[in-house]
């Protein structure tokens, strides 16, 4: 029988509900960080040199510096579908597989994108504040007028799993969906989803709503700057549930202040978190929520489940069920 001290050491960068971690019992020793952490907690740094696994969240940078201090590392398991917090090429070079959690957060994130779209279309934050603030004097024939969804055009930027799930929801509201992506869907898939591919600039010019669903890469960083925001309709609403740096914050601030576009709803920001005194919070046509796309009870439990599966596979030197860098197995041979 293996004594506890012989079990591999895993750094869990955050605290998580115990019931999410049952599958790890008896397979590893865990040292854990606080419930909320933007950086690797200093109390965990001392364990880096013995750690064989890291179970991390998207706020933790797993970069060359960290990897250099963790020579025994055999697996990095990120509890997220996005992995821009991890230096994947460096992990691959070191023979370390990186796990992620695709699929299980598609619906929750698509639901939030639609919720933000509806909220902004119907100006719910302003209307609610007016009601609470005593500015609701009577039924107002021309008050709080919002945007119609039926017959309007939704432009999806990034037609992966989440973009497709938003498309399916959007159809129920009568939205016509166009999309832009570096690779086109197969034509039968386009037909099934009833979507049309458009060049990015045409999508910007013709959409009433734009919802962003691209990963953060060197190509998508800053994708929405002044030029792109100026191309959008003055009535258009921008929704971002992907990664903050895809939209240039200063350009967006100006676009909203000067009414280049009508509104924006952000689940993600740059920087993240956006400081409480940031001017974007003062704008009535901007809604910001704290990166809650996957924040439903079942979704987060399932993300943890997948992250545990990846971690255990890595510790057992087996292929990760959800691996970002499967080429690592070729490198190892
Ligand atoms: C992810 O998993 O990448 C999401 O942003 C978390 O909500």
Image (cartoon, grey):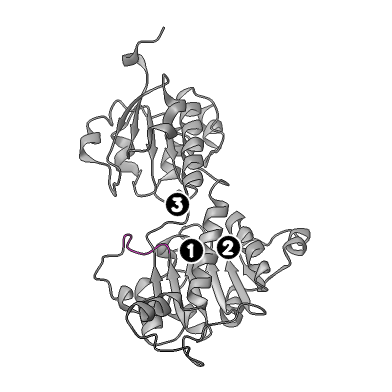
In this rendering, the label closer to the viewer, 1 or 2? 2
* Element class at badge 2: loop
Q: Which residue is mark 2?
A: 158
Relative height, residue 150 to residue 290 (above, below):
below
- Where is residue 91? Give x, y as percent: 42, 38
Q: Which residue is mark 3?
A: 295
Q: Which residue is mark 1?
A: 220
Can residue 45 be seen by looking at this rendering? yes
The earlier-in-sequence mark between 3 and 2 is 2
**Looking at the image, do the residues carrying marks 3 and 2 touch, with CB atoms under 8 Å apart?**
no
Q: Nearer the viewer, residue 318 or 69?
A: 318
| Mark 1 and mark 2: Cα distance apart in space | 10 Å
Measuring 25% from the left and 35% from the top, which residue is drawn there? 44
Q: Which residues are magenta?
A: 267-273
> Residue 267 lies in what quarter of the image?
bottom left
* Element class at badge 3: loop
* Element class at badge 1: loop
User: Under 8 Å from ligand 1: the CB of mark 3?
Assistant: yes
Relative height, residue 141 to residue 90 (above, below):
below
The earlier-in-sequence mark between 1 and 3 is 1
């Amino acid at each position: 029988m293996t004594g506890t001290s012989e079990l591999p050491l895993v750094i869990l960068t955050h605290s998580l509900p115990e019931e999410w971690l049952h599958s790890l019992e008896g397979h590893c020793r865990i040292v854990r960080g606080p419930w909320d952490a933007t950086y690797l907690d200093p109390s965990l740094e001392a364990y880096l040199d013995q750690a064989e696994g890291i179970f991390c969240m998207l706020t933790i940078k797993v970069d060359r510096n960290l990897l250099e201090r963790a020579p025994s590392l055999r697996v990095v398991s990120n509890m997220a579908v996005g992995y821009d917090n991890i230096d994947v090429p460096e992990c691959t070079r070191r023979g370390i597989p990186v796990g992620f959690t695709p699929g299980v957060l598609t619906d929750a994130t698509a639901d939030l994108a639609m919720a933000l779209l509806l909220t902004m279309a119907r100006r719910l934050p302003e209307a609610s504040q007016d009601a609470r603030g005593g500015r609701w004097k009577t039924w107002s024939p021309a008050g709080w007028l919002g945007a119609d969804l039926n017959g309007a055009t939704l432009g999806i930027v990034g037609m992966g799993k989440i973009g497709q799930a938003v498309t399916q929801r959007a159809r129920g509201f009568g939205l016509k969906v166009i999309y832009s992506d570096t690779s086109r869907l197969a034509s039968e898939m386009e037909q099934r989803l009833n979507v049309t591919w458009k060049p990015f600039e045409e999508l910007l010019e013709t959409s009433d709503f734009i919802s962003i669903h691209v990963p953060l890469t060197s190509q998508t960083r800053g994708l929405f700057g002044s030029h792109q925001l100026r191309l959008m309709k003055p009535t258009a609403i921008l929704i971002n549930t992907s990664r903050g740096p895809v939209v240039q914050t200063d350009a967006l601030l100006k676009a909203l202040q000067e009414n280049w576009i009508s509104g924006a709803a952000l689940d993600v920001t740059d920087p993240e978190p956006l400081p409480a005194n940031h001017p974007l919070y003062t704008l009535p046509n901007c809604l910001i929520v704290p990166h809650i796309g996957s924040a439903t009870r079942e979704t987060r439990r399932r993300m943890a489940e997948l992250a545990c599966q990846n971690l255990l596979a890595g510790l057992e030197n087996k292929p990760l069920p959800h691996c970002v860098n499967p080429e690592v197995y070729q490198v190892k041979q």
